[in-house]
Image (tube, rainbow, N blue to C red):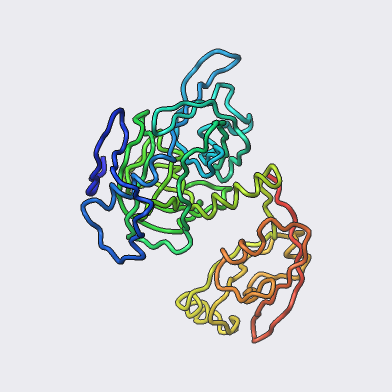
């Protein structure tokens, strides 16, 4: 079990995180420049705690009870909209679990949940509960500028132990799905050493201001202190697409892409003096025959320097610009060997599952 760092919290009643003041009125650490103190983790966890829920689902076959699936989630809208992992409430290829979804709030109230939509590839689901009064919510942060070494907090219900708080640091950002064995997925993950166990799935990864920056998802079984969370920016985009289309629209170009750094460019130029004269961009090492990219004129060895009128230096920029646009023309500027440049038009198609 990992060595947990400075987890300072108190209990009130049945597994409730106690706090005696309105923490939402406190300025953020970014505003005050405060350092990590004895109460920083406790305060951040307490800010988010009322909006964090436990989710259980009775799993069975033909109405015969087999097991109970347990996870966590975050109330993101006061109308009872909850963000969680798809694997907590749904099964690949089958849809929703056959059992009833029970959502337990931080204060002990229970509700029946309804699975609104989900995407198994990104492992994101939206669940809805109905309440006569507005419900407490978490505050959504941003995962765009996270750095390795930042302190983070995981809150959830590991092993059915509700309102459990653990802390650690971000071990890595933009960990590729292929690096952790999730082939077919395109999501980058936040790696953390905060303790995440069965039942934490779907719960929030928080920053020191109590804002949600990730959705806890996976723990490495062969190691302690190696867990992964879906960046909140990705989760929100997926959720918005699910609400808009009923599924996630994934534009397909049919290329492999490699972000170029100064060191990689120097190495490629040493190997091939004809390599395009660029200082940044995205290299296209492979173009799939018959793909939209090939039809638009992209070739292996091209370096994308501009996409849809925007300068490009990362794969994530291209993904963001594509969004959910299918059948739309994109202008792509590439640089080629021997100083050549080309302006192309590429029309992405929708990827098939």
As drawn, is 138 to the left or to the right of 280? Answer: left
Residue 288 locus on image (x, y percent): 70, 60
Q: Quadrant of the C terminus?
A: top right
Residue 55 locus on image (x, y percent): 47, 30
Of the pair 229 and 48, the residue shown nearer to us: 48
Residue 210 locus on image (x, y percent): 38, 51
Quadrant of residue 173 within the rendered picture: bottom left
Residue 130 locus on image (x, y percent): 57, 31
Q: Quadrant of the N terminus?
A: top left
**Residue pictured at 31% horizontal, 65% vertical:** 32
Of the pair 3 and 81, the residue shown nearer to us: 81
Relative to 141, is 273 above or below? below
**Residue pictured at 75% horizontal, 74% vertical:** 344
Of the pair 96 and 15, the residue shown nearer to us: 15
Relative to 292, is 229 above or below? above
**Residue pictured at 47% horizontal, 78% vertical:** 262
In the rendered picture of this protein, how many numbered marks are placed on residues?
A: 0
């Amino acid at each position: 079990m990992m060595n947990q760092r400075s987890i300072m919290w108190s209990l009130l009643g049945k597994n409730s995180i106690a706090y005696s003041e309105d923490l939402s009125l406190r300025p953020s650490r970014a505003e005050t420049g405060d350092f990590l103190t004895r109460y920083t983790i406790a305060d951040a966890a307490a800010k988010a705690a009322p909006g964090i829920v436990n989710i259980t689902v009775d799993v069975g076959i033909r109405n015969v009870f087999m097991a109970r699936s347990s996870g966590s989630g975050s109330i993101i809208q006061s109308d009872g909209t909850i963000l969680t992992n798809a694997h907590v409430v749904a099964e690949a290829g089958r849809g929703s679990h056959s059992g009833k979804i029970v959502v337990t709030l931080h204060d002990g109230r229970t509700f029946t949940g309804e699975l609104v939509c989900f995407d198994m590839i990104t492992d994101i689901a939206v669940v809805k509960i109905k309440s006569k009064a507005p419900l407490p919510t978490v505050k959504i942060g941003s995962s765009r500028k996270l750095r390795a070494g930042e302190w983070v907090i995981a809150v959830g219900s590991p092993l059915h132990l509700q309102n459990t708080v653990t802390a650690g640091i971000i071990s890595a950002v933009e960990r590729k799905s292929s690096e952790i064995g999730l082939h077919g997925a395109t999501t980058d993950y936040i790696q953390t050493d905060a303790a995440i166990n069965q039942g934490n799935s779907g719960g929030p990864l928080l920053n020191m201001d109590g804002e949600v920056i990730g959705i806890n998802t996976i723990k490495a079984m062969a190691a302690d202190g190696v867990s992964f969370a879906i960046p909140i920016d990705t989760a929100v985009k997926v959720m918005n697409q699910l609400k808009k289309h009923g599924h996630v629209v994934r534009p397909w170009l049919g290329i492999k892409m490699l972000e170029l750094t100064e060191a990689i460019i120097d190495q490629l130029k040493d190997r091939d003096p004809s390599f395009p004269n660029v200082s940044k961009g995205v290299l296209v090492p492979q173009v799939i025959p018959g793909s939209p990219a090939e039809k638009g004129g992209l070739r292996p060895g091209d370096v994308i320097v501009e996409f849809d009128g925007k300068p490009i230096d990362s794969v994530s920029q291209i993904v963001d610009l594509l969004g959910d646009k299918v059948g739309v023309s994109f202008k792509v500027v590439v640089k080629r060997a021997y100083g050549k440049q080309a302006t192309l038009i590429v029309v992405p198609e929708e990827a098939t599952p």
